[in-house]
Image (spheres, rainbow, N blue to C red):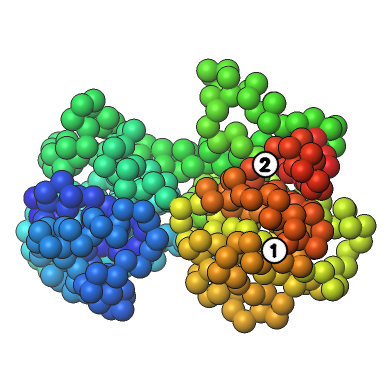
Amino acid sequence: MRITVIGTGYVGLVTGTGLAESGNRVLCIDKDADRIQGLQRGEIPIYEPGLETMVPRNVEKGRLRFSTSFEEGVQHGELLFVAVGTPTSPENGGADLSQVYEVARDIGRYMDSFRVVVLKSTVPVGTTEEAGRRIKKELAARGLGEHLVEMAFCPEFLKEGSAIDDFLKPDRIVLGVESPKAQDYLEDIFAPFSMRENRIMKMSIRAAELTKYAANAMLATRISFMNDLARFADIRGIDIEQVRRGMGSDERIGPSFLYPGIGYGGSCFPKDVKALIHAGQEWGHTFSILEAVEAINERQKSYLLERLLAHLGGDSLEGQRFAVWGLSFKPQTDDMREAPSIPIIRGLLERGASVRAFDPVAMENAGKIFGPLKGLEYGEDPYEILEGAHGLLLLTEWPEFRSPDFERMKELLKTPLIFDGRNQYDPGKMRDLGFVYYGIGRGGR
């Protein structure tokens, strides 16, 4: 089938590549000419394991192309997937839908035969219907009937770092459809991804829109709840790891997303929690739980710094140097959006400390975010940055940090002090090795 994907960001590029992999002829379009030219040269603009081989393979097979021509994109696809950004609006905290509605307008200006338009961007309830109205308005202005377009909403459930597997082997495929024709198109497209077991879930468009927000909000809630418990565990000298295992063994709860840390970040959870809170406010409903979830998450990002200052017994870090392992908001991605490392590093620098940081893939993006900040340097080796440091802060749980050479670390560090923001190490073992160790909810020092 001929498919157009509008937007070549994280969701759009993974979606377009995944659909091409199953044999469709996919055209990905974006108004960012530099990005499209780079893709045409085989340059992948995001770090996502698997894309670097799958994109060129499908380009070579003629199943995947890239263009900046919106008109070409609308003419090419029988299905038009909209995967543009819906960032947080700085004005009210809701979702900024300007890109979605701009795309809807342009689709109506260029289409001249039947199309199914599928929103994949995460959007508030009612957005898909409004986008459809705007398309039909443009069609009417050109003397064309509104029967030429059918709308659908198909949310993505992609985890950064494993997005290719998530797309090709989904645990569920949610189709928000309200016409048999749109449903038939989408079931045909997604059938190859649910052949062994029917994973397709059909529901109304509005239910699908809310399902996406609800899923992310629930996961964010679990994280914030565990972080709140971890703080209490530190106060009472309890190891939260024991509590986590006890909770997670209850089949009604399960073990997923029960790992305390320094707060969630990335492109989805912070944005979607804010957007759902704002949507509730617009319709006279208060999401009290989500307001607490957001507040706890913001507070948690400062917890490691609070513990460091408490250990040192003051608010000034003048003359101190710290090493930081991990900058991205999670491993297997270079995404720095809302990463806890940002406020932590800024907090260290503001108090007079200097910082040397290492991340396997995110240092280029970190440089763009921080700029040329005085006191902040990057190292090419995780051990090199430890030399002479007054302590180590582990902020992202990259696999290479899980079993390091502790003896070498102790030799390099000026002070054998570790603040583990991801609970990667065992407190008892670290004590036996001669480290002063702080985790999150591991029973205090």
Name above or below for residue 382 compared with residue 197.
below
- Give, as a three-letter code, the residue at label 2: Tyr
Residue closer to the observer: 36 or 281:
36
What is the crowding at mark 2: few (fewer than 14 residues within 10 Å), some, or many (at least 20)?
Answer: some
Residue 330 visible to the viewer? yes
Residue closer to the observer: 240 or 129:
240
What is the crowding at mark 1: few (fewer than 14 residues within 10 Å), some, or many (at least 20)?
Answer: many
Q: Which mark is residue 9?
A: none
Residue closer to the observer: 292 or 279:
292
Asked whether, in this view, residue 379 is left or right of residue 343, the answer is left
Q: Considering only order in the chain, which callout, 1 or 2, is on the residue closer to the N terminus?
A: 1
Picture coordinates of residue 90, whole percent (x, y): 56, 66
Task: Identify the image quadrant of residue 130.
Answer: bottom left
Q: Which mark is residue 386?
A: 1
- Give, as a three-letter code, the residue at label 1: Leu
For the point 70% across and 26% down, the residue is 242
For the point 70% across and 37% down, the residue is 426
Task: Identify the image quadrant of residue 367.
Answer: bottom right
For the point 28% across and 74% down, the residue is 38
Asked whether, in this view, residue 342 is left or right of residue 174, the answer is right
Question: Which residue does the numbered mark 2 point to in the structure image?
Answer: 425
Asked whether, in this view, residue 206 is left or right of residue 291, the answer is left
| Element at label 2 | loop
Q: Residue furthest right?
A: 313
Picture coordinates of residue 420, whole percent (x, y): 70, 48
Task: Identify the image quadrant of residue 115.
Answer: bottom left
Query: Looking at the image, how many numbered discs can be counted on the residues?
Result: 2
For the point 73% across and 37% down, the residue is 429
